[in-house]
């Protein structure tokens, strides 16, 4: 076997030929979403291989507006073409059951002009008798035509052997991602997300620019840090494109940038929500804060560009404030009032430009994740909920009052409390927020997203037992 050279391998082809299923089969585990509906893969999915190369799954080339929304179809085609340019080796996946189509021939012509190494994978050869279907694909003129079944694994070993001659071991790399706290830096465009991440990393690994929207992709970086007590903190950091208001997401590239950002947020344990000190809280900040909590991620507020506020105050103190400390306190109160959903999330005033306050962020995220993962005694949890119900009883809905009989923590991401109750559907959103905020305060979970899951209509026997009554 040749020495691995860190090559890039891309799976391309028209929609619904089985690229994602073959991608997962090559890796030996499920990474890409697989569905019979054409156009499910809309973005490039990249996995690092044990041999040092990269494997890329792409959306179907030739995606049309009748398959997906036009903006998504355009973006899918853009990304597939990008993969062809970026790849060293291209696996051209075709469908033996559909046969050679005109779109296959158009893609083949594009691949011929690319000058790249091409391997044709004739997919869906699920039985030996199906092998005769591959004959027509030899007419495309490519040297390597391999019959495979991504569904059942037939022929995949042959494909892997061919790839390993040039790329080294073809399998997903075994990393330590499960032990890392995943942190996403999110916010509006041009609030300084990449600058903050560069400061955390201690080097300029990310592009920083004054032009809004410079970051078009979600960038992943691993970093280890050590606490004073010697404990090693492991993190996986995601820089993201700035989220724009929906009315400003006009291009396919903007759409995919927003999609990647939301995916990064959904996969994160902690989100650093960056706010511009000079502009304060915008409507987009409010929407983003709500979306972050819905994903189950914990939130740390980072007020960047605080150096501007300090400089402004030094030149001429703002009316009504005796010093910058008092101004910061009022700013904190104003932000929390504008973002009531964040509860008592930690807030830090930082300057990425001057590298001030950045050193506190990682340890804060580590502590916050520790809070989310910490066990909560069932007795304490039930005591807290009972106290909240007694102090502010829920209103009657359709002649019934909400009752919680027993509660237990069932998950840490998000911090989920399952409540066994009489009628879950009569728990109003207003009262649900009251319970969530009350639990957050009582359990010292500021910044942690809390989800209440109700299980109602318990049997009479269980209800009597939970209420401490004897069965008649």
Image (cartoon, rainbow, N blue to C red):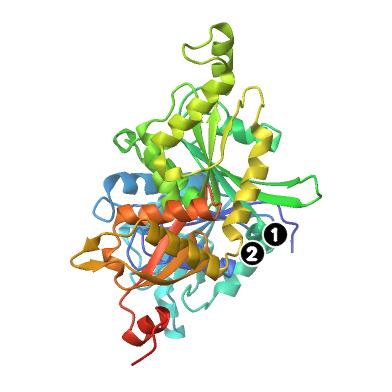
In percent of width and height, residue 332 lies at: 50, 31
Give the camera-side residue of 394 and 106: 394
Q: Which residue is mark 2?
A: 170
Name the secondary structure under disc 2.
loop
Classify the position of the N terminus by image quarter. Answer: bottom right
Whether tag 1 and tag 2 are in contact, CB under 8 A, the answer is yes
Q: Is residue 123 left or right of residue 65?
A: right
- Measure the alpha-carbon separation of dots 1 and 2: 6 Å
From where the camera sits, is residue 58 visible?
Answer: no
Q: Which residue is mark 1?
A: 51
Give the camera-side residue of 274 and 66: 274
Residue 146 versus residue 388 in the image, above or below: below
Give the camera-side residue of 206 and 336: 336
List the single residue furthest toward the bottom.
Answer: 472
Image quadrant of residue 98? bottom left
Give the camera-side residue of 367 and 34: 367
Q: Is residue 304 left or right of residue 249?
A: right
The tag earlier along the polypeptide, 1 or 2, is: 1
From where the camera sits, is residue 322 visible?
Answer: yes
Classify the position of the C terminus by image quarter. Answer: bottom left
């Amino acid at each position: 076997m040749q020495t691995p050279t860190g090559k890039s391998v891309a799976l391309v082809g028209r929609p619904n030929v089985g690229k994602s299923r073959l991608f997962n089969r090559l890796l030996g585990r499920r990474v890409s979403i697989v569905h019979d509906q054409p156009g499910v893969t809309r973005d490039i999915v990249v996995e690092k291989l044990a041999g040092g190369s990269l494997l890329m799954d792409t959306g179907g080339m030739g995606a049309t507006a009748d398959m997906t929304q036009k903006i998504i179809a355009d973006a899918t085609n853009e990304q597939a073409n990008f993969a062809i340019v970026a790849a060293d080796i291209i696996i051209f996946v075709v469908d033996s059951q559909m046969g050679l189509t005109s779109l296959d021939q158009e893609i083949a012509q594009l691949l011929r002009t690319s000058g790249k190494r091409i391997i044709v994978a004739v997919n869906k050869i699920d039985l030996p008798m199906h092998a005769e279907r591959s004959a027509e694909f030899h007419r495309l003129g490519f040297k390597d035509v391999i019959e495979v079944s991504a569904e059942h694994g037939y022929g995949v070993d042959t494909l892997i052997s061919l790839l390993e001659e040039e790329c080294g071991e073809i399998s997903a790399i075994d990393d330590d991602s499960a032990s890392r706290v995943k942190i996403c830096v999110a916010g509006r465009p041009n609030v300084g997300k990449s600058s903050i991440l560069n400061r955390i990393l201690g080097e300029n690994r990310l592009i920083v620019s004054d032009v809004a929207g410079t970051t078009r992709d979600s960038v992943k970086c691993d970093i280890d840090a050590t606490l004073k007590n010697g404990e090693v903190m492991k993190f996986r950091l995601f820089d993201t494109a700035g989220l724009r208001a929906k009315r400003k997401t006009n291009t396919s590239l903007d759409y995919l940038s927003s999609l990647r950002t939301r995916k990064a947020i959904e996969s994160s344990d902690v989100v650093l929500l960056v706010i511009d000190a000079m502009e304060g809280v915008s409507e987009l900040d409010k929407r983003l804060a709500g979306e972050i909590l819905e994903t189950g991620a914990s939130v740390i507020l980072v007020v960047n560009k605080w150096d501007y506020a300090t400089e402004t105050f030094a030149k001429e103190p703002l009316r009504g404030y005796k010093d910058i400390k008092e101004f910061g306190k009022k700013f904190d109160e104003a932000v929390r009032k504008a973002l009531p959903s964040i509860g008592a999330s930690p807030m830090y005033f930082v300057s990425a430009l001057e590298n001030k306050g950045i050193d506190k962020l990682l340890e804060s995220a580590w502590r916050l994740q520790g809070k989310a993962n910490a066990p909560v005694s069932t007795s304490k949890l039930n005591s807290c909920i009972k106290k909240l119900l007694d102090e502010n009883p829920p209103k009657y809905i359709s002649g019934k009052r909400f009752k919680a009989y027993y509660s237990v923590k069932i998950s840490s991401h998000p911090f989920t409390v399952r409540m066994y109750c009489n009628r879950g559907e009569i728990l109003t959103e207003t009262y649900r927020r009251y319970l969530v905020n009350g639990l957050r305060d009582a359990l010292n979970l500021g910044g942690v997203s809390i989800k209440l899951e109700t299980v109602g209509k318990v049997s009479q026997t269980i209800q009597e037992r939970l209420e401490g009554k004897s069965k008649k």
